[in-house]
Amino acid sequence: MPFYSEDALKAALHSRGYRATAQRQKILNILQALPQGEHLSAEDLHALLKDQGERISLSTVYRTLHLMVYMGLLRELELAEDHKHYELNRPLRDHHHHLVCVQCGQTIEFTEDLIDRIGENQAHSAGYYVLDCQLMLYGVCDRCSS
Amino acid sequence: MPFYSEDALKAALHSRGYRATAQRQKILNILQALPQGEHLSAEDLHALLKDQGERISLSTVYRTLHLMVYMGLLRELELAEDHKHYELNRPLRDHHHHLVCVQCGQTIEFTEDLIDRIGENQAHSAGYYVLDCQLMLYGVCDRCSS
DNA sequence: ATGGGTGCAAACTGTTTGCAATCTG
DNA sequence: CAGATTGCAAACAGTTTGCACCCAT
C-alpha cells in the first residue's frame, strides 16, 4: 500500500510547479518499497536503479532527493556514516528515532510518540510547519564500553 | 567557569592513554569560551586559532575534534549547512535542541528536559551510555511558508 | 628514547554545477 | 515550443591520510 500513487506524486509536483518525470517516479517507488526503517544513500539508490536496468544519472538522484526533502516527501538522516541516508517521510506516528554507537556505528531504532508530540508543540509555537522530527542519541554501546 | 581546567583535560586524556598537547588544550579552550549555543565548524576554529597567532594545522583540528567527540567532550551537530559544527558537550540539563527551516536555514534552539530524560531512558534500556541527545526538528518557518 | 602527535601536501569522497541535449506541459 | 529536467564530465568542499619530524611521557 504505497503512500504515494503515481498520480499523487504527479499532483504533488504539479501543485508546486514542478514536472513529473520518469526518474522522479522511479526514485520515489524504490523508497516506497523499502521496509520500515530501511534507508538508502544516494549512491545506494543509484546502484539499485542501475541493477534494475534503469538509465539514470547520479546527479539526477541527488537533485531528486533534495527536491523531495524540500517538499517534505522524504526524510534525510545523518547517522554514523559520513554520508546522508534517505527514507520515505511517513506520518508522524510512524516516526522512529535513532540511537547510534559513536565507536562501532551500531544503530538502534525506536519509536516514542511523546517525543513527536513535544517536537510538534515546539515547532508550532515557533511558527514552523513540521516536516520531520528526529531524536538522535549518540553514545557508546555495551559491547564497546566493556 | 570553564568545565575543563587544564588539569582536567590532561587527566581525561591520560586516563585513556592519550597525550596532553598544546593544540588539544587550545582547541578545547576556544570551545569552552564560546557562549552557550554557539558552535563552530572545523574551519571556523582553525581560522580563529590563526587569528590568535597560533600555529596549528587544519588536520590537527580535525583529528582533535574527532578525538574529543569520541571521548564525549564535544557534541557534533549536523545543521542545515553542509559541514559539521562542534560545541562543548555540557551536562544533559543544559542540552538544547534544534529547529531548522529546510528552506531558508533559519535555526532556532530550545531546551526541553523531558526529551533528555526520555533519551536517557531509551539509551539505558538498550545498554548504551549516552554522550549526546539531540532532537532535530526540520520544517518550514512561517516566513518561508507564506 | 619511544612511539604518539603534528604539519604539510596530496588524495579522497560525497556532492554540486555548467552546459548541451531531451523531455513535459 | 518554452522552459524544466536530465546526463555527462568537470569542479568543488570538507575531510582524511602518508610520511617525516617533533615532543610528551
Image (tube, coloured by chain):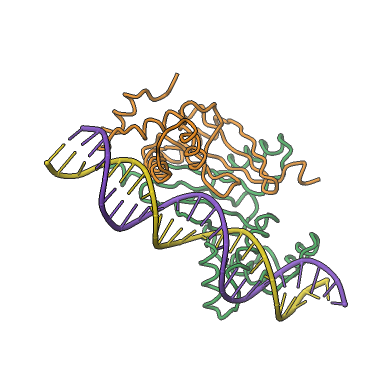
Chain colours: A orange, B green, C purple, D yellow
* Left or right, A24 with reference to B67: left
Q: Residue at x 40, y 31 (%)?
A: A26
Residue B98 percent across, percent down from the top left: 49, 48
Q: Where is A79 relative to C11, above or below?
A: above
Residue C21 percent across, percent down from the top left: 26, 45
* Left or right, D6 with reference to B114: left
Q: How many marks?
A: 0
Q: Where is B6 relative to A43, above or below?
A: below
Q: Residue furthest top?
A: A1
Residue B40 percent across, percent down from the top left: 52, 62
The answer to whether residue B108 is seen in the rendering is: no
| Quarter containing the C terminus of chain A | top right
| Quadrant of the rendered image containing residue A142 | top right
**Along the viewing direction, whichever of A15 and D11 lies nearer the viewer:** D11
Q: Residue at x 64, y 42 (%)?
A: A100
**Along the viewing direction, whichever of B144 and A103 lies nearer the viewer:** A103
**Along the viewing direction, whichever of B113 and B120 lies nearer the viewer:** B120
* Left or right, B120 with reference to B48: right
Q: Residue at x 64, y 66 (%)?
A: B28
* Left or right, A53 with reference to B15: left
| Quarter containing the N terminus of chain A | top left
Q: Where is D25 relative to B137, above or below?
A: below
Residue C15 percent across, percent down from the top left: 45, 50
The answer to whether residue A131 is seen in the rendering is: yes
Q: Residue at x 61, y 65 (%)?
A: B32
